[in-house]
Image (cartoon, rainbow, N blue to C red):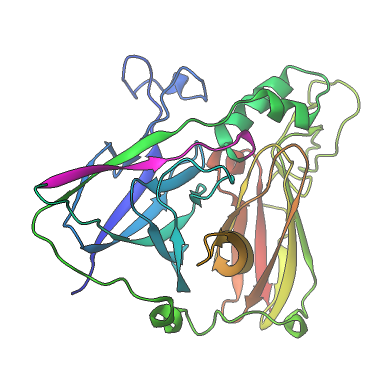
Amino acid sequence: MAAEQKVFVLQQIRFGPDGKLEDFDKAIPDRQWSRNITVNGVFVPTIRIHPGEVQRWRFVHAGVEDNIALALDGHQLHEIAADGLALGRRVDWPAAEPSQEGVRELLLGPGYRSDVLVKAAPLAPGETSKEYFLRDGMLPAALSLQAATAAIRVAQSRAAFNAGDLIADIGNKPQRIIARVLVEGAAREMALPSGEELRDRIPSDLVPIRDEELTDVEQSVRFDGMSRRSCTPDGNCPICQTETSDCKLHFTSNERVFMPEHAPRMLKLGQASKWTITGDGIFPHPFHIHVNPFEVERDEPAQDGKMHRAKLWKDTIILPAGGQPKLIVIRSRYMDYEGEFVMHCHILGHEDMGMMERVKIAK
């Protein structure tokens, strides 16, 4: 029996205390405004599933306000694809419950996509239905975009600041309910696919990149929205040491704000390269690149219940934060597209304020 598919477009809708969206003058990050998560434009919709049924839920994080720690009461989320690319395995993220071992939920940043399988729990004798909740779990401040936005506001009011102190002053992101899940109706006993059955689903061109393939020039990217900079008319933004009217926080990629006339970053068709990507240490910027996905590592749950490092292919990745800049290393190959595209922060306000670059693949 084929699994029913449901698409979940997740957004954070910002509206005023009067419940209206029309006042765009107030469409600025503010703690007084709601950031509840909608699913396909609806607050806390009801999702129906039969006992024993397997459904494929396709999540699209189309918001920009915060990262989402995805978990479902009483059920594992069996992830089979990330950013539209099959994993070739089944990753069993734990059910929603308090954990003493840190963040174990399926983490979605802006721009992320994730396909999961959900197998509904059986009903107890005499039950006709049972209610569960799909949740956005609590996140530490280092993974919260709202906490980082609050830290930026504090930084803007200070001539000097310590990134670690700012993060320490911000509390954890609270838990939210995303949807109500109702298990009801006649049982439909369906089997989950095993990891072995999913192995051949991974695209044939997304094989691991070997060291000897890394023949193109190594690339380096830094997203910075927490350094005071003074930008010149050509878009270059060196760190400024003295207070001037332009010495303020700018959103930059490699110390420049985006301008269309900037020369693109050059890559060679038919080759592969290693990229080293860093952020400002405060904001967990989601790095996103068009056209070519990249190979990266993440922590994910293993069969023994512990977290371990695993490789996967993505096109969007959250940069580490927590007070100190940290790096992510990715690998990418350029086999069949010749031309231009962009890379940028997937917080679209940051992109609009300059955190973007042109990229070009040529022979």
141 part of magenta stretch: yes
From this viewpoint, is residue 289 visible? no
Placement of 107 over or under 243, stated as above or below: below
Give the left or right position of residue 17, taking residue 29 as reference: left
Q: Quadrant of the C terminus?
A: bottom right
Q: Position of residue 147 (x, y in %)?
A: 60, 30
Query: How many tags in the picture?
Result: 0
> Of 186 and 59, which appears nearest the observer?
186
Specify start and end residues of the magenta stretch as a single range: 128-142
> Of 362 and 103, which appears nearest the observer?
103
> Residue at 12% across / 61% down in the picture?
187
Placement of 167 over or under 299, stated as above or below: above
Placement of 120 over or under 239, stated as above or below: below
Q: Position of residue 313 (x, y in %)?
A: 56, 69
Direction top: furthest residue = 18
Give the left or right position of residue 323, taking residue 296 as reference: right
Q: Position of residue 92 (x, y in %)?
A: 44, 62
> Residue at 29% across / 41% down in the picture?
179
> Residue at 48% across / 30% down in the picture?
174
> Residue at 73% across / 54% down in the picture?
262
100 part of magenta stretch: no
From this viewpoint, is residue 88 visible? yes
Give the left or right position of residue 63, taking residue 324 as reference: left
Placement of 352 over or under 265, stated as above or below: above
Q: Quadrant of the N terminus?
A: bottom left
